[in-house]
């Protein structure tokens, strides 16, 4: 299992996990849910105590991935399989992403 903290404007909002079977789970942190001023990170994932589950990487995170030549360069340099979307995400979405979401790997 691999896990990462999802940050929204540098503040921890939730935990994204990829299970050994390849499926994905996302759950908001309790502190994020309780703060009425904090937004949902995606319209498709409203603030809730429920755990969101998907057989594929959630679209909100998938759209943070590089494409084309940038993806090929990252995969070659970091030795990541091009189909390992979570692995690519962990190496590319730490600092400079489009939008407010960044990702920090949990060891």
Image (cartoon, grey):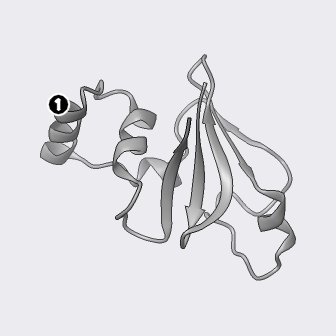
Q: Is residue 4 above or below residue 43?
A: above
Please indicate whether residue 1 sits to the left or right of residue 95 in the image: right
| Percent x, y of residue 23 | 61, 27
Residue sitting at x 77%, y 56%: 29
Please indicate whether residue 64 sits to the left or right of residue 32 in the image: left
Residue sticking out furthest to the bottom: 37
* Quadrant of the frame with the N terminus: top right
Q: Work out whether residue 64 or residue 104 is closer to the camera in this orientation and state it.
A: 104
Please indicate whether residue 82 sits to the left or right of residue 68 in the image: right
Residue sitting at x 54%, y 69%: 10
Quadrant for residue 25, please give it.
top right
* Quadrant of the frame with the C terminus: top right
Q: Work out whether residue 93 or residue 42 is closer to the camera in this orientation and state it.
A: 93
Q: Is residue 57 above or below residue 39?
A: above
Residue sticking out furthest to the top: 21
Quadrant for residue 28, please give it.
bottom right
Residue sticking out furthest to the front: 107
Q: Residues within 10 Å of mark 1 (few under 14, many from 20)?
A: few
Q: Work out whether residue 79 or residue 85 is closer to the camera in this orientation and state it.
A: 79
Q: Which residue is mark 1?
A: 76
| Percent x, y of residue 8 | 58, 68
Residue sitting at x 22%, y 40%: 74
Q: Secondary structure at mark 1?
A: helix
Q: How many marks?
A: 1
Residue sitting at x 28%, y 29%: 82
| Percent x, y of residue 61 | 49, 51
| Percent x, y of residue 56 | 54, 33
């Amino acid at each position: 299992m691999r896990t990462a903290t999802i940050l929204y404007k540098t503040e921890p909002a939730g935990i994204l996990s990829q299970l050994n079977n390849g499926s994905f789970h996302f759950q908001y942190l309790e502190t994020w849910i309780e703060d009425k001023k904090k937004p949902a990170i995606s319209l498709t994932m409203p603030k809730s105590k429920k755990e969101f589950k998907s057989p594929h990487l959630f679209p909100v995170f998938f759209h943070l991935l590089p494409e084309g030549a940038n993806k090929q360069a990252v995969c070659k340099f970091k030795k990541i399989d091009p189909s390992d979307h979570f692995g690519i995400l962990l190496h590319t979405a730490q600092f400079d992403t489009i939008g407010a979401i960044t990702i920090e790997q949990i060891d």
